[in-house]
Image: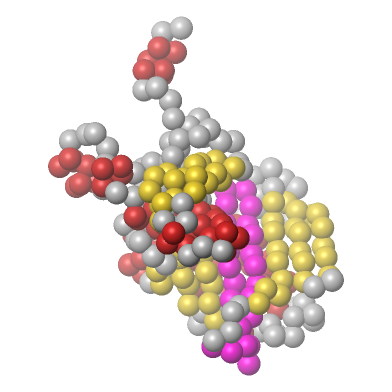
C-alpha cells in the first residue's frame, strides 16, 4: 500500500497543498496532485486543482479560513476517484508543514506538544505565516490523528550564518537572554536554489557559491557560500531587508521620528 504525504504551505491569504505518494521505502516521493486556495482575505476564495489531466481552475468556494480550506481539500482528495492510492484519510501517513520562523531549530522537526507551543511563542515574530501554519497543524491532529506532522522551517537554512553577521550591536546579555539576533528567512527556497544551481553547473553543492534572490510578495537576498547560507537580508523577523507587498523593508530608525514632526 502506498504511503501518502501532504506538503502544506499556509500563507496569510492562501493555502497550497501538494500530494505525494511513496510506493517503496527507497523511492523518491512522486507528486500526484496539487491544490491551491487563494483569496482567503479578499473573497471570493478560489480553488485551483490539478491531478494528472484533471484540472480545476478558479472554482469559487465558500470558506474563509486556512482550517476550512484544509478540511475542504482533504474531503476533495478522499472523494477524488482518480486518486486510487488515497481512498481514505488513513492513507495519509505524513503531513509536512512550511513554518516560517523556527527560532533555534536548525533542521526539520516532528511536531509534538512541546514543539507546537515553542512555535506558537514565535508567532509574534512572523504573524502572517506561523499562525496560519499552526492553525492547520492543529486541524491535522484532529482530522488525521495517525499521521505524523513535521515542520520544515524557512529559518533553518540560515543556521550557518556566522556569529559576527547574525549578532546585533546591542547589549549582548539582553540579546542572548531574549534570543535577539538575525535568523534569516526564505530558507526552503534558498536550499532549493543551492541544490539546483550546483546540479546545473555540474558542481558539488559544497563548492557552489552564489548570490540568490527570492522575489515575490515577500522578497529577500541571500549570500550562499559553498552551499551554505553566509548572510540573508532579513533579520529577527521577515520585516528587515528588501521591501515587500506588506513590508517596508529596512528603514532608517530616524525616519519615524522625522515623519511624526511633519
Region in magenta: 1-25
Residue at far left of view: 173
Instruction: Tell me residue 209's x, y (percent).
Output: 46, 52
Residue occupying image coordinates x 84% and y 71%: 53
Q: Is residue 10 magenta?
A: yes
Residue occupying image coordinates x 79% and y 81%: 81
Residue at far bottom of view: 1
Residue at far top of view: 262
Instruction: Tell me residue 213's x, y (percent).
Output: 55, 44
Q: Is residue 186 magenta?
A: no
Quarter of the image for residue 95 reads bottom right
Quarter of the image for residue 82 reads bottom right
Screen quadrant of the N terminus = bottom right
Quarter of the image for residue 153 reads bottom left
Main SS of the magenta part reads: strand
Task: Report whether residue 180 is seen.
Answer: no
Instruction: Tell me residue 24's x, y (percent).
Output: 59, 89
In depth, the one of 158 and 103 nearer the eye is 158
Q: Is residue 196 left or right of residue 83?
A: left
Task: Report whether residue 48 is seen.
Answer: yes
In depth, the one of 20 and 135 nearer the eye is 20
Amino acid at each position: 500500500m502506498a504511503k501518502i504525504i501532504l506538503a502544506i504551505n499556509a500563507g496569510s491569504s492562501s493555502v497550497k497543498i501538494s500530494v505525494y505518494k511513496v510506493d517503496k521505502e527507497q523511492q523518491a516521493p512522486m507528486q500526484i496532485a496539487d491544490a491551491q486556495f487563494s483569496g482567503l482575505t479578499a473573497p471570493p476564495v478560489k480553488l485551483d486543482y490539478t491531478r494528472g489531466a484533471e484540472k480545476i481552475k478558479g472554482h469559487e468556494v465558500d470558506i474563509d479560513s486556512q482550517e476550512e480550506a484544509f478540511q475542504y481539500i482533504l474531503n476533495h482528495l478522499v472523494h477524488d476517484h482518480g486518486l486510487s492510492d488515497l481512498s481514505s484519510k488513513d492513507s495519509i501517513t505524513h503531513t509536512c508543514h512550511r513554518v516560517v520562523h523556527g527560532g533555534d531549530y536548525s533542521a526539520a522537526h516532528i511536531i509534538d506538544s512541546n514543539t507546537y507551543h515553542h512555535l506558537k511563542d514565535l508567532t509574534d515574530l512572523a504573524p502572517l505565516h506561523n499562525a496560519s501554519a499552526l492553525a492547520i497543524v492543529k486541524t491535522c491532529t484532529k482530522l488525521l490523528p495517525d499521521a505524523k506532522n513535521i515542520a520544515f522551517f524557512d529559518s533553518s537554512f540560515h543556521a550557518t550564518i556566522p556569529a559576527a553577521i547574525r549578532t546585533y550591536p546591542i547589549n549582548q546579555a539582553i540579546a542572548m537572554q531574549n534570543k535577539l539576533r538575525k535568523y534569516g528567512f526564505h530558507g526552503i527556497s534558498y536550499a532549493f536554489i543551492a541544490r539546483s544551481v550546483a546540479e546545473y553547473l555540474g558542481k558539488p553543492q559544497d563548492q557552489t557559491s552564489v548570490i540568490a534572490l527570492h522575489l515575490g510578495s515577500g522578497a529577500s537576498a541571500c549570500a550562499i557560500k559553498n552551499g551554505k547560507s553566509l548572510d540573508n537580508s532579513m533579520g529577527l523577523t521577515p520585516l528587515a531587508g528588501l521591501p515587500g507587498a506588506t513590508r517596508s523593508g529596512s528603514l532608517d530608525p530616524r525616519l519615524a521620528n522625522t515623519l511624526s514632526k511633519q
